[in-house]
Image (tube, rainbow, N blue to C red):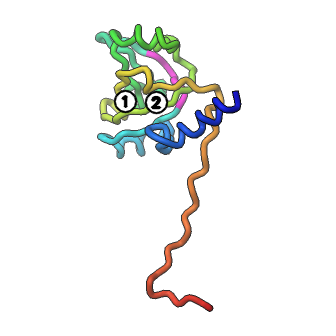
Amino acid sequence: MSELLSREAEARAKGAWAYRVLAADNVERLGRLTRSYQLVEGVVAQVGEASGRIYLNFDKDWRKDSTVLIERKDGEAFKAAGIDPKALAGKKLRVCGWIEWRNGPMIHATHVEQIELLPDGGAPRRKPPTRRPERSRFSVQKA
């Protein structure tokens, strides 16, 4: 089991899951990141359905919150993978995808792999690497 957890930790440091995680409730920041691929995390406040689509809203006011859109036709694939989109209210999610703007930031989840169910506390976040101050090429170095 420890080997499996070790490999998972290594995998998280690579690829899409290595992105910094942004809070779903930070609508202003996500709005500035439209047309970019991001990793977003938050608790689903409510689930809505309209026009053949399932909406995972991260706030009660769907007109200006962050949202994940799942086409109803894709809902069965999510269910088969153990993620029932209609039962995600109150659940903590991590979602990766391209941010669009539709009444707030929105990610269109077309593949099950875009959504990760998290335990209530979420996964521990890594601290960002500390940067060392850059040396000026004109700085004097002491001997």
Q: Position of residue 10 (x, y in %)?
A: 57, 40
Q: Residue at x 46, y 81 (%)?
A: 136
Question: In the displayed structure, does residue 139 sit left or right of residue 120?
Answer: left
Which label was assigned to residue 95? 2
- Binning the other alpha carbons within 10 Å of mark 1 as few (below 14), some (14 to 19) or many (20 upward) gives many
Residue at screen point 53% across, 37% down? 11
Snapshot quadrant of residue 111: top left
Q: Is residue 3 left or right of residue 131?
A: right
Q: Residue furthest right?
A: 2
Q: How many marks?
A: 2
> Gap in Å between the C-alphas at discs 1 and 2?
8 Å
Q: Position of residue 42 (x, y in %)?
A: 53, 31
Q: Quadrant of the C terminus?
A: bottom right
User: Label 2 near label 1: C-beta < 8 Å?
Assistant: yes
Classify 10 Å Cα crowding around label 2: few (below 14), some (14-19), many (20 and above).
many
Whether 93 is drawn above or below 17: the answer is: above
Point out the stretch of residues depicted in magenta: 42-47
- Quadrant assignment for the N terminus: top right
Label 1 sits on what residue type? Answer: Ile
Q: Position of residue 90 (x, y in %)?
A: 57, 20
Q: Which residue is mark 1?
A: 107
Residue 26: image tag: none
Q: Nearer the viewer, residue 1 or 59?
A: 1
Q: Residue at x 50, y 74 (%)?
A: 134
- Residue shown at the point (45%, 40%) measured from the top left: 15
State yes or no: residue 136 in magenta.
Answer: no
Indicate whether 48 appears above or below 28. above
Identify residue type, mark 2.
Answer: Val
Along the viewing direction, whichever of 126 and 66 lies nearer the viewer: 126
- Looking at the image, is mark 1 or mark 2 earlier in the sequence? 2
Q: Main secondary structure of the magenta part?
A: strand
Question: Is 46 positioned to the left or the right of 3 in the image?
Answer: left
